[in-house]
Image (cartoon, grey):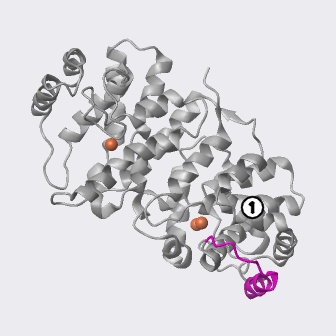
Amino acid sequence: MVDIKLGQLLNSLSYALDIAENRYYGHSRRTAYIAYYIAKEIGLKEEDIIDIYYASLIHDIGMAGDLSNYSVMDIHYHDDLKKEHCALGYKILDKLPLKKEIKKYILYHHEEWEGTGPYGLKENSIPLASQIIHLADYFEIFFIRNTEYKVVDYDVNIISRWLDKYRNKMFQSYLCDAFLEVISKERFWLDLKSININLVLEIIEPGKNISIDIEDLQKISEAFSILIDAKSKFTYEHSKGISNITCNFATYLGYNPLMIKKLTIAANLHDIGKFVIPLNILEKPGKLTSTEFSIIKSHAYYTKLILKQVEGIEDIAEWAGNHHEKLNGKGYPEKLDEKTLTKEDQLIAFADIFQALTEDRPYRNGMNPKNAIDIMKDMAEKGYLCNSMLSDFKQVVL
Ligand SMILES: [Fe+2]
Ligand SMILES: [Fe+2]
Ligand SMILES: [Fe+2]
């Protein structure tokens, strides 16, 4: 039985979304923190507070993928982009095994009290949870713009004036008052300015005992693989392809159904660290400079860092994060070698290399499968890949 804590998983995915190009660190986590305290202040039930907390953590999920070239400010201040990221987010959310309320809260997180938001919902027709996330989201951006993480003395009057500007326009008056109550406590500011907001969230996290099973994790990994692949036109089917090859190869090698599922999840998420890599480097048509290459290489490091935040999937995090390691120690980012690399690490690496060779890249067209296997044969002879696994792999892909 694999038991994964949903809060931990969403928190680590929020980290992945916030360290992406054009984002800033901790936006979703701080939004979740602020929304949590507003929800508590107005006395919502625990169950609703949990939903608001989860929705806040991934409220900007629609910014990843197709919109990854736009910055946080672009998205939050341009009407078209506001609607687009809400709609794209909802499309991805549809594939996630989350409560439908959470999906709805995210869809409407940019609605404005007077009805001027992307979907034109007005006043009490906007879900209260979406209104809370909206206020938390905009305040978080305002806060970061004005403090840039510096430990400054807060001035409640400035925030009052900021709220008054939007009261009854963007935000319902009742929520503005509740928010003023929240910010009157010193703890709020100390937490918000903490360099480790994640530590704060670990302490306050509502619904700590809610967990999901491996089937749900698989669905989440599939949805994220679509987002990862959508970042660049050259990788639009990369993770999906690797996932299919991994599933076939693992079945051929006789793994049990649970292991096949876990390996497929690792394949879906192996490039989640690519969110971090700027698109102009990812799609550069010419040769990469050594700095650009080290930036590219960091994606495997980030994959492991993101997935290791979730207890119970340590093995999946290893297989996913080790997909560029080589048996002769010439891979990256940890220079692991045959002494530590497992058969499962190799399995994902095989699928990744084959898929990469057979798909188009900015600097070359995709190869036919036979030529790709020839290159892999050469790699195996030089000690990069396991020779005996390659003969099995050939049976699966040719
Ligand atoms: Fe947003
Ligand atoms: Fe946001
Ligand atoms: Fe990769």
Residue at point 55%, 34% (across, down): 217
Q: Describe residue 373's horizontal placement relative to residue 62 as left or right.
A: left
Picture quarter with the C terminus: top left
Amino acid type, residue under disc 1 in the picture: Asp
Query: In front here: 235 or 343?
Result: 343
Residue 143 in the image, given as x and y percentages of width and height: 67, 75
Q: Describe residue 262's horizontal placement relative to residue 392 as left or right.
A: right
In this rendering, is residue 330 above or below 39? above
Residue at point 49%, 72% (across, down): 81
Residue at point 15%, 54% (across, down): 363
Residue 235 in the image, given as x and y percentages of width and height: 30, 49
- Check disc 1 and report the residue beneath it: 191
Q: Quadrant of ligand 1?
A: bottom right
Q: Which residues are magenta?
A: 149-166
Query: In front here: 168 or 330?
Result: 330
Residue 270 in the image, given as x and y percentages of width and height: 40, 39
Q: Describe residue 368's horizontal placement relative to residue 32 as left or right.
A: left
In this rendering, is residue 381 above or below 125? above
Residue 376 seen by the camera: yes
Q: Is residue 216 magenta?
A: no
The answer to which image quadrant residue 191 occupies is bottom right
Picture quarter with the N terminus: top right
In this rendering, is residue 390 above or below 24? above
